[in-house]
Amino acid sequence: MNWFTQIAVLTSFNLRTVGQRLGSSASTIFGIAGVVGVFIGVFSIGEGFRRAMTVSGKADTALVMRSGSDTEMSSIMNRDEARVVTDVEGIARTNGVSFASPELFVVINLPKRSTGTDANVPLRGVEPPAFDVRGDIEIVEGRRFEWGKNEVIAGLGASNEFSGLDVGSSIPVGKQNWTVVGAFTANGGIAESEIWTDAGVLAPAYRRGNTFQAVYARLESPDRFQEFKDRLTTDPRLNVMVERQTDYYAEQSTVITGLVTTVGFWVAILMGSGAVFGALNTMYSAVSSRTREIATLRALGFGSGAIVTSVLLESLLLAAVGGLLGAGLAYVAFDGFRTATMNWQSFSQVTFAFDVTPALLARGISYAVVIGLIGGLFPAIRAARLPIAAALRES
């Protein structure tokens, strides 16, 4: 028989005897499934947070803040400066109205529905163009707030995570209670973590006077960004920095995604090590239980390379089954699961959904295959090196 035929025969024989080692084989499969499930679950947190940030940004939208500011929280601009920004050439306009929204950003304390503990929830004061600037705000319950009134609308993510944001309820803002009149979605973006209201009403409630913190501006096209930026940064009346909205939100996600990636890496290493030992134990047991059979096959002319390959293929198959099982369970358990976490760069809560992407599933299954490869390699080498005469004498 040629080498490939030997491998096929040996692999078929190995798989037919898996039932005789059902306990250890099942232990390996479920162990690897658990590792893959946790691996995908942890990394889906980072993917979900990153997605919430990236879908929020648009290449044709610019964010203008005070020069040197890291976030909106640390920025301040007066009304005259905001007016200069909104009048700059390059901003999209309809009927002479500029698609630029000077905005306020504050945080209020609301209890989480799940734990009852207080959390910092972002409250954004906007001007009428804000809805056109964002372009993806859709009221799904109730209505928009009325300008000049103590009314708010809540992002669907915030409404689901925090108490007091049901339509018709009220929340404390400053020294008064404001009515929640609507709930909105924003294509899964970060705006769904926020509460929106009229900036003209929010400013006096927090004694902000005629100030804003940032201006969001939709440009006529993404290509106008550099021109728009140059006009503002060279204007002697202003001291501002200008970023694409996409770049700003990408920066905002770095701390959380970096933390999740680091934690996920070490969790995967530790759990993967345990799974490797499980696979080693299973395959060593498989080799030990078939010592005389392997020796007989070698005596009949089966090569060491074919034996090594057949044992490795069995280990890889068990690992692949475990990987597929873990990936499937992770997808069912985690994909779309909504939660909230602190964005340490703005010190406010961000709601997002875990995102189990196809690429992440592929990474999890690949990790399982690597575990199977390592777990089967040394037992396979041992099987190929068994002395034929001594192995045949074993009872």
Image (spheres, rainbow, N blue to C red):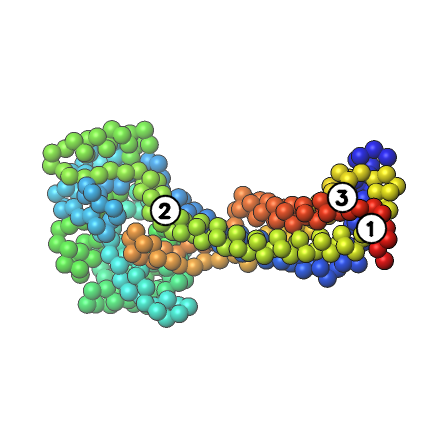
Q: Which residue is mark 3?
A: 384
Q: Earlier in the sequence, mark 3 or mark 1?
A: 3
Q: Earlier in the sequence, mark 1 or mark 2?
A: 2
Can residue 146 be seen from the camera position used here? no
Callout 1: helix, strand or loop? helix
Q: Earlier in the sequence, mark 2 or mark 3?
A: 2
Of the numbered discs in the image, which one, if any, rests on residue 76? none
Label 2 crowd (10 A; few <14 / some 14-19 / many >=20) = some
Residue at (67, 60) in percent of width and height: 27
Disc 1 designates what residue? 391
- The amino acid sitting under disc 2 is Thr
Instruction: Depth check: give the residue in front, 187 or 213.
Output: 213
* Position in image of residue 197 (x %, y %): 26, 56
One can see residue 55 in this view: yes
Residue with the most extreme right position:
300
| Residue at image location 65% in from the left, 45% down from the top | 373
Which of the 4 image quadrants contains residue 83? top left
The label nearer to you, 3 versus 1, is 1
| Residue drawn at point x = 66 percent, y = 54 percent | 279
Real-space Cα distance between discs 2 and 3?
A: 49 Å
Question: Secondary structure under badge 2?
Answer: helix
- Asked whether disc 2 touches disc 3, contact meaning CB atoms under 8 Å apart, the reply is no
Whether 141 is drawn above or below 61: the answer is below
Position of the N terminus by quadrant: top right
Residue at the spot 75% in from the left edge and 59% down from the top edge:
22
Badge count: 3
Q: Can you say whether 178 is above or below 257 in the image?
A: below
Amino acid tagged 1: Ala
The amino acid beneath tag 3 is: Ala
